[in-house]
Image (cartoon, rainbow, N blue to C red):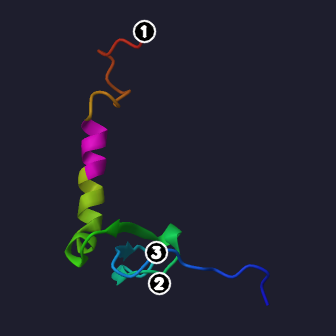
């Protein structure tokens, strides 16, 4: 028997998107490392991958965080 047993965190009423199973789940089902959330509704959790992609796109194009632009003065 393992010394430490995996205990999912979360609570009913919180919605997550499980990256491992590619499904929406409510409350503590899968490990926190395998999920996105919590979201306030099932519909928000269903859009988790789209939301993450949109946020990544915004981050990549944000001039305050874009180190690839040589016109920005680093001093």
Secondary structure of the residue carrying tag 1 is loop
The local crowd at label 3, few if under 14, some if 14 to 19, many if 20 or more residues have their Cα within 10 Å, is some
**Outermost residue, left side:** 43
In space, the residues marked 3 and 2 are separated at their CA atoms by: 8 Å
* Residue for point 36% across, 27% down: 68
Percent across and percent down for residue 41 are 24, 74
The residue under label 3 is 10
Give the vertical position of 15 relative to 49 (above or below): below
Position of residue 53 measured from the top left corner of the image (x, y, whole percent):
27, 56
Name the mark nearer the viewer: 3 or 1: 3
How far is disc 2 from disc 1 in space, using C-alphas? Answer: 48 Å
Q: Are marks 3 and 2 in contact (CB under 8 Å)?
A: yes
Would residue 29 be counted in the magenta stretch?
A: no
Assess disc 2: are there few (<14), some (14-19) or many (≥20) residues with their C-alpha within 10 Å of its C-alpha. some
- Residue tagged 2: 29
Front label number (2 vs 1) = 2
Q: Residue at x 43, y 78 (%)?
A: 11
Residue that carries the numbered disc 1 in the rendered image: 75
Closer to the eye: label 3 or 2? 3
Give the mark, 2 or 1, whose residue is nearer the N terminus. 2
Residue toward you, 43 or 70: 43
Q: Main secondary structure of the magenta part?
A: helix
| Magenta highlight range | 55-61
Q: Residues within 10 Å of mark 1 (few under 14, many from 20)?
A: few
């Amino acid at each position: 028997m393992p010394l430490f047993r995996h205990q999912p965190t979360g609570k009913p009423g919180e919605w997550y998107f499980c990256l491992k199973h590619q499904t929406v789940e409510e409350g503590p089902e899968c490990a926190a490392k395998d999920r996105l959330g919590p979201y306030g509704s099932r519909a928000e959790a269903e859009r988790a991958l789209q939301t993450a992609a949109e946020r990544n796109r915004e981050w990549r194009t944000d001039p305050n965080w874009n180190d690839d632009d040589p016109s920005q003065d680093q001093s």
